[in-house]
Amino acid sequence: MPPLPEGAFDGREAFESSLRLALDAAAAQGWREIVLSDPDFSDWPLGDRSTVAALQAWSASGRSCVVLAKNFDVFARHHARFVQWRQTWSHIIECRICNAAGAPAVPSAIWTPTWFLQRIDIDKGRGVCGRDRERRGGLRELLDECLRQGRPGFPASTLGL
């Protein structure tokens, strides 16, 4: 398995490649916690077979994933495989919406206890990733603030009468 990237990245392909490497590493290394964060995940490859296969390989007892967004509107249309996977693993996936007045902007990022990726410019796909403890800690503080002001969202299933 190739090592996880370190440093700046530029472009959508670099972002997607880093995301896929991270999810493969999560499965191979047994990461216990992952936070996926984006305003809407519209340009993430969460509906791709390879992404869902990596998430499936990662899924196990004792694991947890938080998915944080401003809204989850695109999931049903663009990430159907992820939606189906989430229904099976809803007990380890927590989805939260952070869009209240005064809440911080939801970052486009992946956070784990040992590695992170953050897109600084979403439109151009530019960002930084790595193991830097200070940057990872700063990102976690921002994510925690979004989570504090967020609320549950994107239910795994909808029940109707």
Image: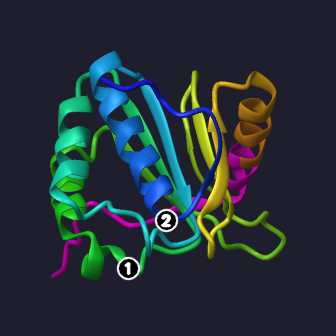
* Separation of residues labelled 2 and 1 (CA atoms): 18 Å
Mark identifier at residue 102:
none
Residue 39 in which image quadrant: bottom right
Instruction: Name which residue type carries label 2.
Output: Arg
Residue 29 point in image, percent of width and height:
34, 17
43 displayed left or right of 90: right
**Residue displayed at 33% across by 18% down:** 30
Q: Work out whether 96 lies above or below 88.
A: below
Residue 16 in which image quadrant: bottom left
Quarter of the picture containing the N terminus is top left
Is label 2 in a helix, a strand or a loop?
A: helix
**Residue displayed at 37% across by 38% down:** 21
Q: Is residue 144 magenta?
A: yes
126 displayed left or right of 35: right
Q: Which residue carries the number 1 mark?
A: 74
Q: Which residue carries the number 2 mark?
A: 12
Quarter of the picture containing the C terminus is bottom left
Nearer to the camera, 10 or 147: 10
* Dot 2 alpha-carbon crowd within 10 angstroms: few under 14, some 14 to 19, many 20 or more: some
Q: Is residue 26 magenta?
A: no
Please state which of the two labelled residues, at mark 2 or mark 1, is closer to the viewer: 2
Instruction: Name which residue type carries label 1.
Output: Val
Residue 8 point in image, percent of width and height:
67, 45
